[in-house]
Image (cartoon, grey):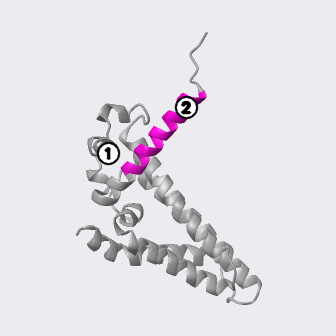
Amino acid sequence: MAYRKTPAEIRRLEAARDHLVVRATEVVAEVGWAQASVTAVADAAGIAAGSVYQHFSSKSALAVEVFRRAAQREVDVLGEVLEGDGDPAGRLRRGVEVFARRALENHGLAYALLAAPAEPAVGAERLAFRRRYRALFASVIDEGVAAGLLPDQDAEITAAALTGAVGEVLVYPLSTSAAH
């Protein structure tokens, strides 16, 4: 008979994994991807470096999970704003304001999510999440065009430009504040 983990053991392992991701996120926000070694993350989590590999197959797998969770929080916040009340132009403006304010308030993590040098797997996740941001913006732009509140335009192109511009305009202030 094969060994099966008990529900209590599964919960304990999930809690340990979540704790590890939270600590890894803090390390990345503080020192960036390059300096967020397995040893640094393990130290922050209060475990041995080898224990990290009980939860993640590699440093890259841990980095991807850190990125996904942190970026998904930002997508969720932006989605709430863009899908909220008000006219489409106002929601777009508020979405950009909220995104920028959150980034500037959490500069270390925001820089890591937007632009800091990272492993290729994290770069691939960045692209995937940019597509999510673009889709959120495009939906509101389409709504505004359909209602006659925004000029006729290709919402996908405008959303891509908006996503790129918002991210790029934040890179310099985030990179200089992340360095201090």
The residue segment tinted magenta is 7-24
Three-letter amino acid code of the residue under disc 2: Ile
Mark count:
2
Three-letter amino acid code of the residue under disc 1: Val
Where does the image place residue 45, in percent across and percent down from the top left? 34, 43
Question: Which residue in the protein does label 1 denote?
Answer: 41
Numbered badge on residue 59:
none
Q: Is residue 135 left or right of residue 148?
A: left
Mark 2 falls on what kind of element? helix
Nearest the viewer among 164 and 180 is 180
Quadrant of the rendered image containing residue 81? bottom right
Identify the residue at image location x=38%, y=37%. 58
Q: Is residue 22 magenta?
A: yes
Question: Which residue in the protein does label 2 denote?
Answer: 10
Identify the residue at image location x=63%, y=81%. 91
Q: Earlier in the sequence, mark 1 or mark 2?
A: 2
Question: Which residue appears farthest toward the front when viewing the image?
Answer: 8
The chief SS type of the magenta part is helix
Where does the image place residue 89, in percent across and percent down from the top left? 64, 86
Where does the image place residue 36, in percent across and percent down from the top left? 30, 50
Quadrant of the rendered image containing residue 51? top left
